[in-house]
Image (spheres, rainbow, N blue to C red):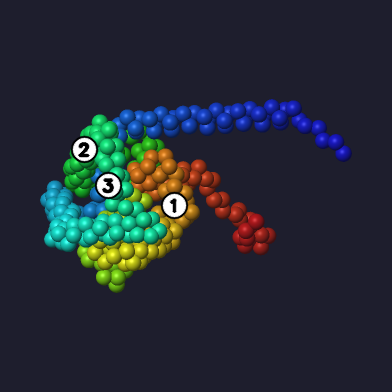
Amino acid sequence: MSVTLSSTKSRAALRASARVSGELLLVLVMTAVAVWLLGRMWSIVWPLIVGLLLTTLTWPTARYLRRHGWPPALAASVVTVLFLLVAGGVVALIAVPVASQSGELTDGVVEGIQRLREWASGPPLNIGDDQITGALDSATARVQDSVGSMVTTVVTGVGTVVNGVVTAVLAVFLMFFMLKDGPRFLPWLTRQLPGRFATDVPTVAARAWKTLGEFVRSQAYVGLLDAVLIGLGLWIVGVPLVLPLAVLTFVAAFVPIVGALFAGFVAVLIALVSNGLTDALIVLAIIIVVQQLEGNVFQPMIQSRGLGLHAAVILLAVTLGGSLAGIVGSLLAVPVAALIAVVWNYLREQLSEPRQEPEASVSPSGAVSPS
C-alpha cells in the first residue's frame, strides 16, 4: 500500500520549521549580545555579583536586627562591621599561627631540600653535586634570559591584586547598601516597569534571591564538612597548624577547583616539611578522598536539595563553567544554572494551560454527577 505525501502539509511543516529556526537564531543572537555587553561591563558586574553573594550570606543577621526594631542603616552598619571583623579574624587565625611557627617551617623546608639532595645523590639516580650545581647554573641562566617576561608577569600579578582589592572594597560597599535598602528594591522595581513586567520581573527576582541564598548556604555547609574531615585527619596524623589549615580549607571551598587544590597543596607541604614524606603521603591520600567525596557525593547532594537541581546537572554546570571562563566560570556555574532554572520554571508556569475541572451533568433524578 503506497503512501502519498501531502504537499500542503509538507509546506506547512517547512514553514513552521523555518519560523522556529529563525526565532531560535534571534534568541541566540540576543544572548550573544547580552554576553558581550556583560563582558564589556565586567568591572562593574563582578563587584555586583560578589556583593550579592555576600549580602545573601549576611542578610539573615540584618533581617533579625530589623525585625527587632533596629533602623535599617544601623542594622546594615553593624552587620557590615561584624562581617569585616569576622573576615579579619579568619585572616588572623591563619596568619598568626603560621608566623609564630615560620622558623620551624623554614628549617623544615631547608632540611627537606637537603634530604632530597641526599636521596638524589644515591641509587638509583646517582646524581652528583657537580650535576646539581650545573642544573642550578642552567636554571639561573634561563631566569636571567627571561627577566623581561618575568617582569611582565609580576606587573600583571600586581595589577590582578589591585583589581581584586578594588573589587572587594566595592563589593563591601554594595553589600552595605543592599542590606540597608534591599527590601525597598522590589517595590521600586514594580513601580518602574509597565504592564505584566511589573508582576513578572519582581516575582522572578524574589525567587532568584532565594536561590542565591540557598547556594551560599549550601557552599558553606560543604566547606564546613571539608574543614572538619580534613582537620580531623591532620590532627590524627599529627600535622602542626591544624586549625589554620582547617580554616583555610573552609574559606577555599567557596572557590571551586582551585581553592581545594591550593588548600590541599599547603596542607601536604606543611606535612612534608614537618613530619616527613610518609605523613605527607598520608595527608595527600586523606585530602584526595575527602575532595572526591565532596565533589561527587556531598556537594551535588547538598546543592541539589537546596537549589532544586539534579546532581548530574550541577556536575555538568561546573565542568562547562570551568571550560568557558576558568575559575570565575566554576564559581558562578551553579548559581547561574539555578537562576536559569528559576526563569524556566516561571515561564513554564505562565505558559502552561490551566487545569480544567471535569464538567458536571444533572441526572434525571436531579442529582449532580460528573460527566
Q: Could you tell me if the residues under marks 2 and 3 are in contact, i.e. CB atoms within 8 Å?
A: no
Which mark is on residue 94? Answer: none
- Of the numbered discs 2 and 3, the one sitting upstream in the chain is 3
Quarter of the image for the C terminus: give it.
Answer: bottom right
Give the left or right position of residue 233, taking residue 175 as reference.
right
Kind of residue sitting beneath label 2: Val
Quadrant of residue 149 in the image? top left
Q: Which percent across, then down, holds residue 328?
A: 34, 43
Check disc 3 and report its element: helix, strand or loop. Answer: helix
Residue at 87% in and 39% down: 1
* Labels 1, 2: front one: 2
The residue labelled by disc 1 is: 314
The residue labelled by disc 3 is: 133
Give the left or right position of residue 142, taking residue 317 as reference.
left
Quadrant of residue 229 in the image? bottom left
Check disc 1 and report its element: helix, strand or loop. Answer: helix
Question: Is 127 located above or below residue 12 in the figure?
Answer: below
Residue at 48% in and 32% down: 28
Kind of residue sitting beneath label 1: Ile
Question: Is 146 located above or below residue 279 in the figure?
Answer: above
The residue labelled by disc 2 is: 158
Q: Is residue 190 visible?
A: yes
> How far is disc 2 from disc 3 in space, using C-alphas?
32 Å
Q: Tell which of 189 and 241 is nearer to you.
A: 241
The count of marks equals 3
Q: Which percent across, then down, holds residue 196?
A: 40, 37
Residue at 37% in and 42% down: 326
Residue at 81% in and 32% down: 4
